[in-house]
């Protein structure tokens, strides 16, 4: 099918809100399509900070004291004043003001881990990771049990590519709180990133010992086995996660991707359907489902998914119009295709892909002048330019302006000398006017650029044959076979040419049999072998092979005629008449067929 578009959405399949009801769902969904570790860290550390020791206003009798009471820090009035001032600055997102107030508070009393950590967070907001790390480290020294300090340090070290130091922070968190699932996930993902798969698996197993019903842990275990390449085990772990929560969207999505890898596309589709039951608005999932439908040639189903995405996401209209238009193209719904590509061009006149396919749609609707304008709009820098020029030349040719057709193709050759399709098409225009020598000259021009191009060499042999330059035709094909001895078309061409002239029949038979081994379902090559047997007088063998040829190429008049000739040679006149009539039905322009039909009918 014709669909070259990239995914509608950038860089991957899935997206979700950071406030998903499943912990780490964003990270999970990005596993094979983005930076998982960054996603994990985002969830761990960009959420609201829980203080190690929250400050409270002191009682009057403790006004100048600072002590730990019930996991809270009591501040002096002066320190508390600056703390409140910092909070006010933060509420207005005035980070410089907040930093100054916290620093002033710490100048008065620097024993509060909470204030150190708040200041570290403010520096992190300004991307000053050096100072952020210094203040976070001080917070951890003051309060070695301050888990939030280690979390912030983990984030900082990860941003600085200090992955070993980041891992130490997560290990510390786990030692302080063995039930902290997020720390296990972050540590395991860092280990996975460093390809320390055994360590990552061991980390997740520790978590599963603490909480065997952690669907996220089973899910991440599946991801690690996917990275290792053990897709069967990965599937087992995804299914384990789904046993715990059958609607766990990330596991459904990655299970579908696993099915894709193993070629189980129907299972992948059914799995994505379950994911959509939980989140019908996951448009990346719909985009992937449409892709799967296209793989199964279920064009209408794919179309429905793209239209659903378009209705909800008009901002992607330009790209979706292309995908939808291409499906209409494959469905041969030319009016719908034309309207869709026209809409894409209206949104962005510089969309060269839309211009090109709009031109083709107009061409199929026989709106030649409009099609030519669309093809002319495709710029010379576009990857669609040469094909647009081929279609433009074809359009002028169909309109009877052969000279203009040649001119636009020659113009394209001047700027794209390496594109062999242009030489081939230009030569075919000359061939239509029986100007074989001119066509041969064009093909030779192309071969001067690409002397070993097999398509050009083959067409050169065809043109030599039509120009009655038989020896040169065979020489061209033989040269092609020196470059590629398994070129089935060249083998067949030489063999059939010899058979048709009733020469070198044994050699012809060998060449054609070799071609059949390469392309056993090619009706034209099969016909050539039948014709060799006919020329050898092996009529029964000829009929047997030609009967197969007409099944493989039922719309070819010449093959039907060959079978009729064989039946006539065997004196089976009724069957010969049947196939002559069939051949004439397929190509009424062949006057010799009408004569053969009349000759048999009149006897």
Image (cartoon, rainbow, N blue to C red):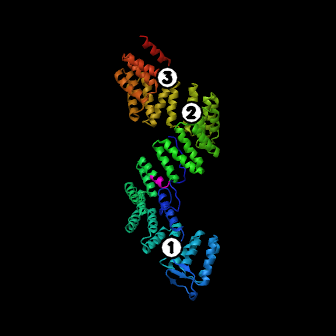
Q: Nearer the viewer, residue 36 or 56?
A: 56
In what quadrant of the picture does the C terminus appear?
A: top left
User: CB atoms at circles 3 and 2 under 8 Å apart?
Assistant: no
Which region shows up in magenta?
Answer: 274-279
Q: Position of residue 440 (x, y in %)?
A: 55, 29
- Local SS, label 2: helix
Residue lying farthest to the top in this orientation: 603
- Answer yes or no: is residue 218 visible: yes
Would you call the spot at circle 1 few (<14 residues within 10 Å), some (14-19), or many (20 or more)? many
Q: Which residue is mark 3?
A: 587
* Dominant secondary-structure state across the stretch colored magenta: helix
Residue 367 sits above or below residue 593 on the image: below
Residue 8 sits above or below residue 419 on the image: below
User: Residue at (46%, 27%) from the top-left corner?
Assistant: 555
Instruction: Say left or right for 235 vs 100.
Output: left
Would you call the spot at circle 3 few (<14 residues within 10 Å), some (14-19), or many (20 or more)? some
- Local SS, label 1: helix
Membership of 24 in magenta stretch: no
Q: Nearer the viewer, residue 244 or 507?
A: 244
User: Residue at (58%, 40%) from the top-left corner?
Assistant: 357
Distance CA(mark 3)–CA(mark 2): 24 Å
């Amino acid at each position: 099918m014709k669909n070259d578009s990239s995914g509608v959405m950038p860089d991957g399949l899935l997206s979700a809100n950071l406030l998903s009801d499943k912990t780490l769902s964003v990270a999970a969904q990005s596993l094979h399509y983005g930076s998982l570790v960054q996603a994990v860290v985002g969830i761990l550390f960009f959420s609201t900070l829980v203080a190690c020791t929250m400050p409270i206003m002191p009682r009057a009798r403790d006004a100048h004291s600072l002590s730990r009471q019930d996991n809270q820090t009591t501040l002096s009035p002066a320190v508390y004043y600056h703390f409140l001032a910092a909070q006010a600055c933060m509420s207005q997102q005035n980070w410089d003001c907040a930093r100054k107030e916290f620093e002033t508070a710490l100048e008065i009393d620097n024993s509060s881990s909470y204030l150190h950590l708040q200041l570290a967070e403010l520096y992190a907001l300004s991307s000053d990771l050096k100072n952020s790390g210094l203040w976070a480290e001080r917070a951890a020294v003051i309060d070695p049990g301050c888990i939030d300090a280690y979390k912030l340090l983990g984030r900082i070290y990860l941003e600085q590519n200090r992955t070993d130091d980041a891992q130490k922070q997560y290990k510390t968190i786990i030692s302080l709180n063995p039930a902290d699932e997020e720390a296990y996930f972050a540590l395991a993902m860092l280990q996975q990133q460093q390809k320390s798969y055994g360590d990552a698996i061991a980390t997740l197993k520790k978590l599963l010992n603490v909480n065997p019903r952690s669907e996220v842990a089973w899910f991440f275990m599946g991801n690690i086995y996917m990275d290792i390449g053990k897709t069967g085990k990965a599937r087992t772990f995804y299914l384990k996660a789904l046993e715990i929560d059958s609607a766990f969207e990330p596991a459904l999505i990655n299970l579908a991707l696993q099915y894709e890898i193993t070629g189980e596309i129907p299972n992948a589709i059914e799995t994505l359907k379950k994911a959509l039951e939980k989140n019908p608005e996951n448009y990346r999932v719909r985009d992937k489902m449409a892709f799967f439908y296209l793989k199964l040639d279920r064009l209408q189903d794919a179309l429905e998914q793209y239209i659903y995405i378009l209705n909800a996401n008009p901002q992607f209209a330009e790209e979706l119009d292309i995908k939808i238009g291409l499906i209409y193209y494959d469905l041969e719904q030319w009016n719908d295709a034309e309207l869709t590509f026209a809409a894409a061009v209206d949104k962005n006149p510089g969309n060269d892909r839309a211009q090109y396919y709009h031109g083709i749609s107009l061409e199929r609707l026989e709106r030649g002048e409009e099609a030519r304008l669309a093809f002319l709009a495709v710029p010379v820098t576009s990857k669609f330019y040469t094909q647009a020029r081929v279609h433009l030349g074809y359009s002028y040719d169909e309109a009877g302006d052969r000279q203009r057709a040649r001119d636009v193709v020659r113009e394209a050759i001047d700027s794209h000398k390496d594109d062999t399709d242009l030489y081939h098409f230009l030569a075919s225009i000359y061939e239509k006017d029986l100007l074989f020598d001119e066509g041969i000259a064009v093909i030779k021009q192309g071969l001067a650029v690409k002397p070993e191009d097999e398509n050009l060499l083959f067409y050169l042999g065809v043109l030599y044959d039509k120009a009655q330059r038989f020896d040169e035709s065979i020489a061209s094909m033989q040269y092609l076979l020196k470059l590629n001895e398994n070129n089935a078309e060249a083998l067949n061409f030489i063999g059939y040419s010899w058979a048709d002239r009733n020469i070198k029949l044994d050699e012809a038979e060998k060449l054609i049999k070799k071609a059949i081994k390469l392309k056993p379902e090619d009706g034209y090559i099969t016909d050539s072998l039948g014709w060799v047997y006919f020329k050898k007088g092996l009529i029964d063998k000829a009929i047997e092979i030609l009967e197969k040829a007409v099944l493989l190429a039922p719309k070819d008049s010449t093959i039907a005629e060959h079978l009729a000739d064989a039946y006539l040679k065997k004196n089976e006149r009724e069957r010969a008449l049947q196939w002559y009539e069939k051949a004439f039905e397929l190509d009424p322009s062949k006057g010799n067929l009408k004569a053969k039909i009349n000759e048999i009918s009149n006897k």
